Amino acid sequence: MKKIHIGLLGLGQIGGGLYEILHAKKALFARQLGVSLEIRRIAEKFPNRKRKVRPPKSLMTKDAFSVVRDPSIDVIVELIGGTRVARELIKEALRNGKHVVTANKALLAEYGDEIFELAHRKRRWLCFEASVGGGIPCIKALREGLIANRIDSIHAIINGTTNYILTQMTTRGTGFAAALAEAQHHGYAEADPTLDIQGIDAAHKLAILARLAFGGKVRFKDIHCEGITQISSEDIAFAKEFGYTIKLLAIAKKTKDGMEARVQPTLLPNSHILASVNGSFNAILMRGDETGDVLFYGRGAGPHPTASAIIADLVDIAKAGVAGPAEDRFLMRALGKTIPVKSIASILSRYYLRFHVIDQPRVLAGISKILGNHGISISDVIQRERSAGRAVPLILLTHDAHEKDLRAAIREIDRLPYVRSRSQVIRIEEA
């Protein structure tokens, strides 16, 4: 029977979930897979903190570097998060001949090349299924299941916090602040939710998916990133009237004039398959030239779904043999190759526009004229009942327009004397 001796870095929610599953299903893995997965040491900054799992004290240490240098350890599972310390620990583990399994999407998005290159040079496994989509096996699908395909596009809901918030705003009419507080109460959002609600977490994950799908590094800093903090209940309601649902989408796609990579609130038609992905669930829609659309759906976070993905990586290492992997040509093809990403100003899209304007004659005509002067045509309009002299919402949907033209028009419109607040702009994806 193959034995894998594991050094676990971090015993937080995911680390605790991993320990719990490995302890509960050790005999099952041994019987069905012929693999013994044994946690030999655990590095935890706060070893005495009260938690659901209680490993023997003999396994615990505060010194993470002693774990990655321990000659009895085969595989390091890194679950401490962040980039500075985790980066040094993973590199030290690889230099000491350890295989590495990580869920650290920020680290891979920002420092992936140097870590992948070191793993290749040391002929060690670097596995990261848990870094995107929690328990959804999307990394394995890209590397194995869709190997016959040229991937043309990715449209993904890959942040459960923001999807939960937008779902509450859509289905219950909850305001943003209240929906965020509810997400925190249920454990779907951190005390500091900035990385989630600003779209940064989703952008980290998109960088990883794009590297695998398109065969080159898509630099994290090149991904245009917008969060959901400016989405109001008013926008949700007007989107419904037009037959759309608002989701935070991570989009990477090839166009005839280059690669697009962006994270943004998006209006999706209610008939779109991603429009019905609700709560904290994730979904990744990939389009291959041979398969067409393929959807991966499931819980994108949480201790047990994420631990499930980590265990899948551990079993892959055990099955292949801890002596070291063969050359990973699929992953290596992206090393040293950077895919240029189009500026957001150059994209072509339809748009939802919301203006708060003083209700007076010729307002719509004035705004329409400015849009027309910039080559932007209107497809739909909602103008509320008259309330003379007071600010009212004016909602427009456009036909396809270039972002730079749209932004120039909006700057001009926002200077009009009858426009009372900054205009809202949300892109529309039809397919």
Image (cartoon, grey):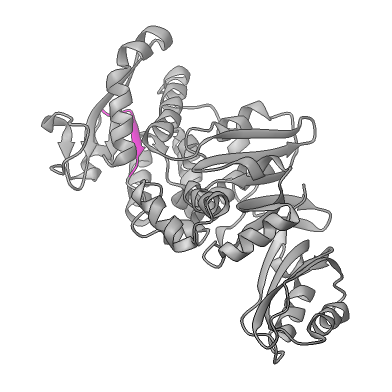
Q: Quadrant of the N terminus?
A: top left
Which span of residues is magenta-colored? 72-79
Q: Which residue is located at x 66 percent, y 76 percent?
A: 423
Picture coordinates of residue 333 (x, y %)? 64, 41
User: Is 347 rendered above or below residue 406?
Assistant: above
Q: Where is residue 232 in the image (x, y as percent from the top left)?
A: 56, 65
> In the image, is residue 73 part of the stretch drawn in magenta?
yes
Q: Position of residue 97 (x, y in %)?
A: 36, 34
Task: Residue at 57% x, 52% y: name it.
Answer: 170
Quarter of the figure with residue 124: top left
Left/right of residue 116 with respect to residue 215 in the rendered view: left
Answer yes or no: is residue 56 visible.
Answer: yes
**Residue ID at (63%, 41%):** 276
Q: How many labels sit on residues?
A: 0
- Residue nearest the observer in this picture, 54 or 62: 54
Vertical order, 145 against 83 (above or below): above
Question: Residue 53 occupies which quadrant of the picture?
Answer: top left
- The residue under the point 80% across, 87% down is 361
Q: Where is residue 217 in the image (x, y as percent from the top left)?
A: 61, 51
| 71 left or right of 213 in image | left
Residue 261 visible here: no
Residue sitting nearer the eye, 318 or 153? 153
In the displayed image of the protein, which residue is found farthest to the bottom?
417
Q: Is residue 126 above or below residue 221?
A: above
Magenta segment: does it hold 3?
A: no
